[in-house]
C-alpha cells in the first residue's frame, strides 16, 4: 500500500496536475472560441524553454523563472490569435482547427531553431525525496507541483465565480449568442481566454521540465491526455478540466499497480488509458462529468 | 490578381529549391532523427556525414567532377516520420541512395515502405536490431554496425564478468529495445545468470516509477536499461536513483549518451557501465580521421557512431563512383564490390586514390574507421563491441570485444 502511494499515486497526481493545467486552456478555448486548439501542447513547450533561458541567463531556479515563461507564452498565444485565428473567426471552425495544427508546427520549429533539438534539464543531478513519517517518500518538486496546482485551482475558481470578467467568460462559454446580445465585449473576453490558457500552459510546461526534462516534443506528447481531460471534465468547464486531468493522470499511473498480485495492465500499455477514457466518455457521456457543452 | 502573385511566388520557390540542385549534383539522402529521442546524438553524427561529403568534393568530386551533395531529412527516429522523410528524399529529391536511418525501427520502416519498393540502396550506420537481418530487402538494405545478436551476447559476458548474476531488464518497446533485450536475456540465462524481471516500457512517458517499483522488488543486483537516453533511459536512471530502486546500471549504446551524465551527474554513475558498437582497438585510419574531425568541428570525434556514419557515407559515394552513374540498380550492385575483399585497400580520406583505382578498372576494398565492413549475404557486418565507463562528462572505452 505504501508502495502504491509513493510510486503510483503521488506521481499520478503530479502527472494529473500537469494535464489539468494544460486541459484548462484547451477546455476554455474550446468553450469560448469553439475549436480544438492543437497548438496548446506546443505553447507548453514554449513556456518550458522560456523558463530555461531565464534559468541560464539569470541563474535562478526554475520555479522563479515561471513569470518569464508566462510572459513569453502569452505573447506567443496572442500573436498566433492575431495572425492566424482571428482572420478565420467567421469561417467554419475546421479552418481554425487546421490552422492550429500549423501554429503547432511553427511554434515547435521556432523552438528547435532557437534552442536546438537536444533535451535539457533545469538542474543537473537528482534529488533524494523527502521522507515523511518514515514511510512516505515524496520528491520536493512533486510537492511543489501539487501545491501550486491546488493554489491555481482555488484562484481560478475565485476568478470565474466572483470577478466580472470570469462571469463574462462563463456566459460566453454557455451561450455565445446570448452573451453577445447582452453586450459583452467578445474580443476582450477572447483575449483574456488566451492569456489565462497560455499562462497555465506555460506553468504546466515548466512543471514538466522540472519533473523530467525539457525537449521540443514535450507539449505535443501530452496533447492527447490533455484533450481527454478536457472532454472528461466537460467542454468549457475549467474546473471540470482540472478534475479530468487529475483523474486521467492518476488512472494512467495506478492502472499498472499489481492490485491483485499481478499487474492489472502491462506498463507499456498505460498510454492507452487516456485513449480508452476519452472514447468511453464520447460514447456514454459526451457532455462530460461537469455537464459541459456538447460538441 | 492575388492568386497570380501567389502562383508566381510558388513557382519562384520551386525554381529556387530545384535550382539549388544543379544538373551536376549527385544527391544522396541522409535520413537522420534530428528531433526526437536521438536528438542528442545527432550533431557529431551529422558532422561525420558532412566530413565524408567534404572529402569527396575536396578529392575531385564524384562521377567525373560532379558535386556530391547530402540532402538531410528529419525522421524523428520514429517509424512514420521516417517513412515520410524517406519518401520525400526518394520521390522529391530523387536521391541516388540513402544513408540512414539511425534507429532500428526507423530503418526498418523506411526500408520496407520506401527504399526497397523503389529500388534505392539504403545503408544504415547505426541500426542494430536483429530484425534488420531478416528483412526481404532484395539486397537494398545494409548496415555497418554489428547486429544486437552480437551486442546482446557480449553484454551478457561483460555483466557476468563483473560478478553480477542477478539483473533486472527494462527495455523500450521498439525494434531496438525488443531485439537486444531478447538476445541479452537468452545469452545471459544460457551462461548461468538470472534475469529476475523483464519489463518493457513505452517511450516518452514522464514517470517510470511504477515499472521500476516492480523491477526493484524482484531482488536484482543491477538494472539493465535498454533504451535511448533522450527517450526514456535517462528518466529511468534518474527515478531509480531518487527512489533508491537501483544504484547500478548497465546500458547499451542507446543509453551511452552524454545527456545521461548531464542529467544524472557523473558521481551517481561511477559503478555503471555500458556496451556500444565501436571501432577496432588499433586503427591508424580512424586516428587520422578523428584528428581531422576535431580540427574541422572542434570536438566530438569520440562520440558514438561518428566512424560508422563517415564510413556509411563514404561507402555509398564509392558505390556510386564504381557504378559510374546514378542508376540505382548499378549502385546497389557496386556496394559489395567496393566494400568487400578482395581488392586494393582504401581508407577514410583516400577518395582521390579510390577514384583513380576505379578509373583504372581495379577492384577496391574500403576498410573504414569503424572496421573492415565485409557485408555478408544479409547485408550485415561483423564488428567490435566496446565496454565503456563514465569519465568526467563523457565516456571512456576500457575494453574491446571482437
Image: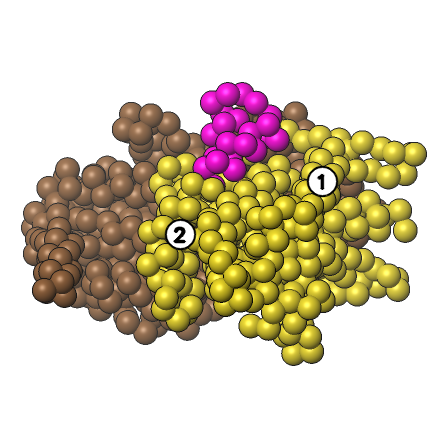
Chain colours: A yellow, B brown
Q: Write down the region rendered in magenta.
A: A50-73
Q: Residue at x 84, y 63 (%)?
A: A262
Identity of the residue furthest to the top in this view: A59
In the depicted structure, whether residue A30 falls above or below residue A78: below
The circle drawn on residue B311 is none
How far is mark 1 from mark 2, CA to CA? Answer: 28 Å
In the depicted structure, whether residue B5 falls above or below residue B357: below
**Secondary-structure class at tag 1:** helix
Q: Residue at x 83, y 60 (%)?
A: A258
Please state which of residues A186 and A146 is positioned toward the viewer in this rendering.
Answer: A186
The residue that mark 2 highlights is: A81
Q: Residues within 10 Å of mark 1 (few under 14, many from 20)?
A: few
Please state which of residues A179 and B35 is positioned toward the viewer in this rendering.
Answer: A179
Marks 1 and 2 share the same chain:
yes
Q: Is residue B92 left or right of residue B84?
A: left
Q: Residue at x 57, y 54 (%)?
A: A168
Q: From this viewpoint, is residue A13 visible?
A: yes
Identity of the residue furthest to the right in this view: A133
Identity of the residue furthest to the bottom in this view: A283
Please state which of residues A71 and B313 is positioned toward the viewer in this rendering.
Answer: A71
Q: Main secondary structure of the magenta part?
A: helix
Q: Residue at x 45, y 62 (%)?
A: B79
Tell me where residue A284 appears, x and y as whole percent: 69, 78
Q: Residues within 10 Å of mark 2 (few under 14, many from 20)?
A: many
The residue that mark 1 highlights is: A151
Q: Is residue A254 left or right of residue B256?
A: right
Q: Identify the subunit bearing mark 2.
A: A
Tell me where residue B69 appears, x and y as whole percent: 19, 49
Give the mark nearer the N terminus: 1 vs 2.
2
Tell me where residue B41 appears, x and y as whole percent: 44, 41
Quadrant in the rendering for residue B180: bottom right
Amino acid at each position: 500500500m505504501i508502495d502504491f502511494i509513493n510510486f503510483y499515486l503521488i506521481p499520478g497526481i503530479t502527472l494529473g496536475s500537469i494535464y489539468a493545467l494544460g486541459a484548462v486552456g484547451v477546455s476554455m478555448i474550446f468553450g469560448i472560441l469553439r475549436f480544438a486548439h492543437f497548438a496548446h501542447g506546443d505553447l507548453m513547450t514554449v513556456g518550458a524553454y522560456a523558463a530555461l533561458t531565464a534559468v541560464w541567463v539569470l541563474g535562478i531556479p526554475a520555479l522563479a523563472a515561471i513569470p518569464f515563461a508566462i510572459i513569453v507564452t502569452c505573447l506567443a498565444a496572442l500573436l498566433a490569435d492575431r495572425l492566424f485565428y482571428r482572420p478565420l473567426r467567421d469561417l467554419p471552425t475546421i479552418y481554425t482547427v487546421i490552422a492550429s495544427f500549423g501554429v503547432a508546427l511553427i511554434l515547435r520549429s521556432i523552438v528547435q531553431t532557437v534552442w536546438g533539438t537536444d533535451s535539457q534539464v533545469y538542474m543537473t543531478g537528482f534529488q533524494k525525496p523527502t521522507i515523511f513519517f518514515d514511510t512516505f517518500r515524496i520528491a520536493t518538486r512533486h510537492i511543489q507541483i501539487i501545491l501550486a496546482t491546488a493554489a491555481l485551482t482555488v484562484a481560478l475558481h475565485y476568478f470565474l465565480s466572483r470577478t466580472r470578467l470570469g462571469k463574462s467568460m462563463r456566459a460566453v462559454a454557455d451561450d455565445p449568442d446570448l452573451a453577445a446580445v447582452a453586450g459583452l465585449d467578445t474580443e476582450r473576453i477572447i483575449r483574456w481566454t488566451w492569456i489565462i490558457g497560455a499562462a497555465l500552459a506555460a506553468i504546466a510546461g515548466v512543471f514538466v521540465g522540472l519533473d523530467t526534462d525539457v525537449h521540443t516534443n514535450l507539449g505535443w506528447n501530452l496533447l492527447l491526455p490533455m484533450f481527454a481531460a478536457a472532454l472528461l471534465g466537460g467542454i468549457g468547464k475549467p474546473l471540470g478540466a482540472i478534475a479530468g486531468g487529475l483523474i486521467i493522470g492518476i488512472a494512467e499511473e495506478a492502472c499498472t499497480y499489481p492490485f491483485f498480485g499481478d499487474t492489472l495492465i502491462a506498463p507499456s500499455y498505460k498510454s492507452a488509458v487516456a485513449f480508452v477514457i476519452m472514447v468511453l466518455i464520447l460514447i456514454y457521456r459526451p457532455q462530460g462529468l461537469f455537464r459541459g457543452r456538447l460538441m | 490578381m492575388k492568386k497570380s502573385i501567389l502562383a508566381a511566388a510558388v513557382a519562384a520557390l520551386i525554381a529556387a529549391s530545384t535550382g539549388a540542385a544543379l544538373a551536376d549534383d549527385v544527391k544522396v539522402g541522409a535520413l537522420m532523427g534530428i528531433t526526437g529521442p536521438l536528438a542528442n546524438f545527432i550533431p557529431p553524427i551529422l558532422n561525420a556525414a558532412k566530413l565524408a561529403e567534404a572529402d569527396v568534393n575536396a578529392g575531385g568530386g564524384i562521377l567525373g567532377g560532379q558535386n556530391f551533395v547530402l540532402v538531410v531529412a528529419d525522421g524523428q527516429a520514429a517509424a512514420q516520420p521516417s517513412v515520410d522523410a524517406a519518401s520525400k528524399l526518394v520521390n522529391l529529391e530523387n536521391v541516388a541512395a540513402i544513408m540512414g536511418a539511425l534507429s532500428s525501427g526507423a530503418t526498418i520502416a523506411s526500408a520496407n515502405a520506401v527504399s526497397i519498393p523503389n529500388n534505392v540502396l539504403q545503408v544504415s550506420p547505426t541500426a542494430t536490431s536483429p530484425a534488420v537481418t531478416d528483412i526481404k530487402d532484395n539486397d537494398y538494405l545494409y548496415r555497418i554496425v554489428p547486429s544486437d545478436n552480437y551486442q546482446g551476447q557480449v553484454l551478457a559476458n561483460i555483466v557476468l564478468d563483473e560478478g553480477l548474476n542477478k539483473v533486472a531488464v527494462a527495455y523500450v518497446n521498439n525494434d531496438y529495445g525488443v531485439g537486444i533485450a531478447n538476445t541479452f536475456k537468452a545469452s545471459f540465462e544460457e551462461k548461468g545468470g538470472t534475469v529476475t524481471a523483464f519489463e518493457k516500457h513505452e517511450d516518452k512517458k514522464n514517470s517510470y516509477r511504477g515499472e521500476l517499483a516492480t523491477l526493484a522488488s524482484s531482488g536484482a543486483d543491477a538494472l539493465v536499461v535498454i533504451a535511448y537516453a533522450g527517450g526514456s533511459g535517462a528518466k529511468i536512471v534518474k527515478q531509480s536513483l531518487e527512489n533508491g530502486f537501483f544504484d547500478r546500471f548497465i546500458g547499451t549504446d542507446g543509453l551511452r549518451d552524454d545527456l545521461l551524465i548531464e542529467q544524472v551527474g557523473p558521481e551517481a554513475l561511477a559503478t555503471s557501465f555500458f556496451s556500444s558498437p565501436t571501432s577496432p582497438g588499433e586503427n591508424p585510419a580512424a586516428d587520422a580521421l578523428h584528428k581531422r574531425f576535431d580540427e574541422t568541428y572542434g570536438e566530438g570525434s569520440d562520440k558514438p557512431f561518428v566512424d560508422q556514419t563517415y564510413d556509411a557515407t563514404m561507402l555509398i559515394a564509392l558505390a556510386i563512383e564504381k557504378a559510374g552513374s546514378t542508376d540505382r540498380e548499378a549502385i546497389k550492385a557496386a556496394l559489395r564490390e567496393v566494400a568487400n575483399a578482395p581488392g586494393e585497400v582504401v581508407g577514410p580520406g583516400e577518395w582521390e586514390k579510390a577514384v583513380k583505382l576505379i578509373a583504372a578498372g581495379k577492384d577496391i576494398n574500403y576498410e573504414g574507421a569503424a572496421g573492415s565492413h565485409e557485408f555478408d549475404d544479409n547485408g550485415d557486418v561483423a564488428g567490435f563491441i566496446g565496454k565503456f565507463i563514465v569519465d568526467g562528462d563523457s565516456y571512456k572505452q576500457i575494453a574491446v570485444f571482437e
